[in-house]
Image (tube, rainbow, N blue to C red):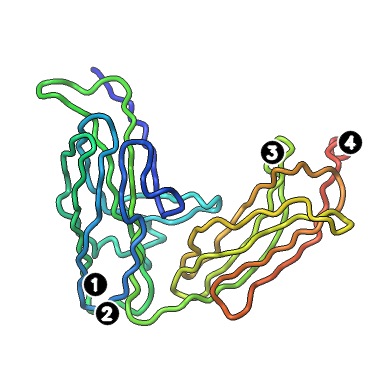
Amino acid sequence: MKHRICILLITLLAALPARAELGLALAPMRVEIQIPAGAQYTDSLRLTNDSEGPSRIRAELLDWYLDETMTPQFADRYVQEKNFSCRDWLQVNPREVDLVAGGAFRIRYTLRVPAETPAGEYHCGAGFVTLPPLEPGSEPMGMYIAVRAVAAIYVVVGSASSQPVFKDLALRSAGEGAWEAVALFENQGQKHYRIQGFIEVADASGNVLEKVDYPQVPVLGKRMQSLPLRFKTPLKPGTYLLHSLADVGLPETLEASARVVVEDPSRKQK
């Protein structure tokens, strides 16, 4: 029996360019909608085949979340996202489309919000994945690289707001002598927020060694989100000061500092 090995590459969340270099482009890649319970909303996404040959593309209805490394995770359903998902409200048409090289097509999507939906923000994804080329009468074989592009959809039903809390700031080893600061944020509200700001590391004398900006990823409602930011600067054994400023859309900027110690690894081995 002949088999095909499929490798899936993913783009999402507008943290990446709207036009990927892997053969599939989607715009917009983030949709934010405010709608009352019981209503429906219809719009379209532009899908473009950037590859050198024709592609068959299949639509997917997805749940998603960000893990503790800020990596988006996708699946048909996630149990933990059940109370926050708009996946079952989403319809996409058509579900499959053939595009010539350089071709583009408008994919229509509709969201139908149930009348009994509580106020809050809900999220889901409209995904599009390339399918293996298959000639009539042939069997799949060899290796095939599939590309998935996902539009992240946020639906606000009624009134919802975010409640950002800066919970913790720490330093941890990233392996091979590297170090990363880890900021822990909580969202006690129902609407996602994004962070603009930075974490900097200074030596014991207060000299700033490096500053790293927060990535533009969402902190979804009713959860904690860990944001690890790696430093390029090697940190020798000693005492350091971490300092962070975070603009999360509040009247005041959230600020945190932590004094941390990098231990001599040779002492740990004794």
Which corner quadrant of the image does residue 234 belong to? top right
Name the amino acid, label 2: Pro
Name the amino acid, label 3: Gly
The residue lying at 25 percent from left, 18 percent from top is 2
Q: Are marks 4 and 1 in contact (CB under 8 Å)?
A: no
Q: Earlier in the sequence, mark 3 or mark 2?
A: 2
How far from the left and from the top, in percent, is residue 90? 23, 61
Q: Earlier in the sequence, mark 1 or mark 3?
A: 1
Q: Quadrant of the N terminus?
A: top left
Q: CA distance from mark 1 to mark 3?
A: 46 Å
Q: CA distance from mark 2 to mark 4?
A: 64 Å
> 77 or 253: nearer the eye?
253
Q: CA distance from mark 3 to mark 2?
A: 48 Å
Q: CA distance from mark 1 to mark 2?
A: 8 Å
Which mark's residue is nearer the viewer, 4 or 1? 1
> 1 or 255: nearer the eye?
255
- Secondary structure found at label 4: loop
Q: Which residue corresponds to mark 3?
A: 175
- Secondary structure found at label 3: strand
